[in-house]
């Protein structure tokens, strides 16, 4: 086999985060008594994206995300909750709605016995572990690395140093990262000196300067790369 260790992102790689996020957001609005509209959804998406981008780039902390995104989104509404309380509601709904990306289950079954599998994800440890548990796949992974535990977000080297420090006898030349984000997963893999595989199910154009070793539109195609 060309590779023996696979670092795998969760959101929009294994789980359809966008679909789960839509469900969770609508449920939070129900909890808050706020009517759903495309306008408020778009406001949330833009706010969350901006805060996450700032976190990945080291311009703000993860706490800024949890404390601010729903405060900004619900500005103008009378809500009796703090930003963190609203975010807790959202993440609870998110963890309860795991939706797999196409062929993700088949992919995991195909690699589970032959590869060292490691989750690498930006997020809240409690939420990400609960999502894996609810999906019944925690035991497939030798290690689960979440940015809230490491003190760093992908693509920072500190995130990957944290992971490799906890993996015995890891050979970076035989390690590959699989993820959907060019700026977090692929740039992180480049920074860490490992091979990169960009999961691009929608076939979007890479308009960045970030190069990748492999690009797939179907998770089943990863099997041909790693074996």
Image: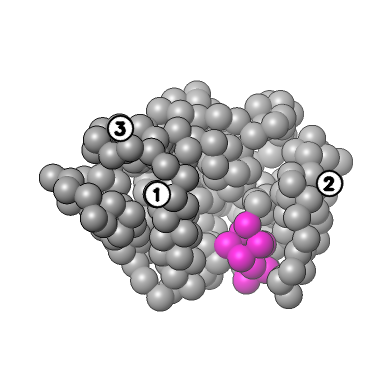
- The residue labelled by disc 3 is 30
Q: Residue at x 24, y 35 (%)?
A: 33
Q: Disc 1, disc 2: CB below 8 Å?
A: no
Q: Position of residue 51 (x, y in %)?
A: 41, 64
Q: From the viewer's perspective, is the residue at label 2 or at label 3 nearer?
A: 3
Magenta range is 181-191
Rendered-image quadrant of the C terminus: top right
Instruction: List the residue tagged with mark 1.
Output: 40
Say whether disc 2 or disc 3 marks the residue closer to the N-terminus. Answer: 3
The residue singled out by tag 2 in the image is 225
Above or below, comparing residue 1 to residue 172 in the picture: above
3D distance between C-alphas at marks 1 and 2: 42 Å
Residue 127 in the image: x percent, y percent?
37, 40
In this rendering, the answer to whether 122 lies above or below 188 is above
What's the residue at 30%, 59% (across, down)? Answer: 72
Q: Main secondary structure of the magenta part?
A: helix
Q: Around disc 2, counting alpha carbons within 10 Å, would you say few (fewer than 14), some (14 to 19), or many (20 or more)?
A: some
Residue 112 versus residue 49 in the image, above or below: above
Marks 1 and 2, the one that precedes in the sequence: 1
- Residue 185 in the image, given as x and y percentages of width and height: 61, 59
Secondary structure beneath disc 1?
Answer: helix
Label 3, residues with CA under 10 Å away: few <14, some 14-19, many ≥20: few
Q: Can residue 92 be seen here? A: no
Q: Quadrant of residue 149?
A: bottom left
Residue at the image point whose x is 51% and y is 56% from the top? 163
């Amino acid at each position: 086999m060309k590779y023996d260790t696979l670092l795998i992102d969760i959101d929009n790689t294994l789980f359809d985060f966008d679909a789960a996020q839509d469900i969770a957001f609508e449920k939070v609005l129900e909890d808050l008594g706020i009517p759903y509209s495309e306008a408020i959804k778009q406001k949330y998406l833009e706010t969350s994206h901006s805060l996450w981008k700032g976190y990945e780039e080291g311009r703000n902390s993860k706490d800024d995300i949890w404390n601010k995104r729903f405060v900004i989104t619900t500005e103008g509404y009378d809500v009796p909750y703090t930003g963190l309380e609203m975010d807790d509601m959202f993440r609870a709904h998110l963890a309860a709605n795991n939706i797999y990306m196409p062929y993700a289950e088949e992919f995991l079954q195909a690699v589970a016995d032959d590869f060292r599998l490691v989750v690498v994800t930006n997020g809240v440890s409690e939420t990400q572990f609960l999502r894996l548990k609810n999906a019944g796949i925690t035991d497939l992974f030798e290690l689960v690395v979440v940015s809230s535990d490491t003190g760093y977000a992908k693509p920072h080297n500190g995130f990957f140093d944290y992971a490799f420090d906890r993996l015995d006898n890891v050979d970076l030349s035989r390690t590959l990262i699989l993820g959907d984000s060019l700026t977090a997963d692929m740039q992180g893999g480049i920074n860490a000196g490992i091979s990169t595989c960009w999961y691009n199910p929608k076939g979007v154009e890479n308009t960045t300067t970030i190069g990748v070793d492999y690009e797939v539109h179907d998770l089943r195609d990863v099997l041909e790369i790693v074996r």
